[in-house]
Amino acid sequence: MTLPTVVNNTQNKQLETALKKAYSILGQVVQRVVLEDLGGVVDAANGKELSPYFVKYYKQGNLCNGSDTGNGCPNSGIGTGNFCTFMQKNYKTYNGKSNPACVGNDVISNTVDNTTIFFDAPNLAGSEGSATVGKILMAIDVNGWQKKPNRWGHDIFMFQITKNGKLLPMGAEGMSWPEEDYCSGTSSSVNNGYGCTVRALSDKDYFKNLPK
């Protein structure tokens, strides 16, 4: 194999390992939040409402709102609001054809193990509104927002938490973004890559076949 191929394969293997670790930790944190903080029932309206509970269980976790300028917050000094502009400028869809929509852009948490967690609050005015209302959605960039590739389905992955506290990898049938439509090598959808999580966790060859 040529050197670029070897480097690419190594990077993809690192992303696979990082996703499995992040998923395991997230699952443990969800259990603690649901049982210890919420009494077994998730009555929050969205992921943003849950964010203060999550940071308690991540070592040196912190919350970044749109106007924050410290703690490594990604839009430091850019002004108020959420992280929509930041995500559209710094992330790409699964196949790199589009800038992504704004899901998971309301509150961000950086953690000591170099992951970034994105918490969502639905916005009916946005193109993705109907798919987010009534859902508790969050995403994890497994190597942090500062490190590339910053592409959905490569290093950032979507999850949903049900009202009974179950953690679901996005992409399963019946979810807002099923993998057959939103983990595509050809789609120009701004949501392309949201549905890749379930495949990334179940297909042993997934990271070997990421689109360039």
Image (cartoon, grey):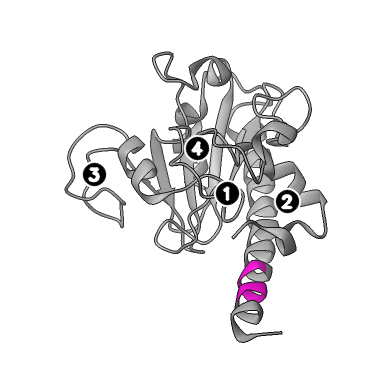
Give the quadrant of the C terminus: bottom right
Task: Please give the residue where the numbered disc 3 appears in the rendered image.
Answer: 68
Per the image, label 1 sits on a secondary structure element best described as loop
Residue 202 placement, left or right of 36: right
Residue closest to the eye, 83 or 67? 83
Residue found at the very far front of the displayed protein: 186
Residue closest to the eye, 188 or 103? 188
Residue 24 belongs to the span the image colors magenta: no
Q: Which mark identifies residue 200?
A: 2
Task: Please give the residue where the numbered disc 4 appears in the rendered image.
Answer: 53
Per the image, label 3 sits on a secondary structure element best described as loop
| Inter-mark Cα distance, 2 to 3 | 32 Å
Residue 22 placement, left or right of 102: right
Please give the range of residues in magenta: 8-12
Nearer to us: label 2 or label 4: 2
Residue closest to the eye, 133 or 186? 186
Residue type marked 3: Asp
User: Which image quadrant is residue 15 in?
Assistant: bottom right
Verify CB contact (< 8 Å) between mark 1 and mark 2.
no
Reply above or below: 76 against 186: below
Residue type marked 1: Asn
SS assignment for the magenta stretch, majority: helix
The residue under the point 25% across, 32% down is 81
Nearer to us: label 1 or label 2: 1
**Percent position (x, y) of residue 178?**
71, 30
Verify CB contact (< 8 Å) between mark 2 and mark 3.
no
Give the quadrant of the N terminus: bottom right
Task: Please give the residue where the numbered disc 1 appears in the rendered image.
Answer: 95
Residue 128 placement, left or right of 40: left
| Inter-mark Cα distance, 1 to 2 | 15 Å
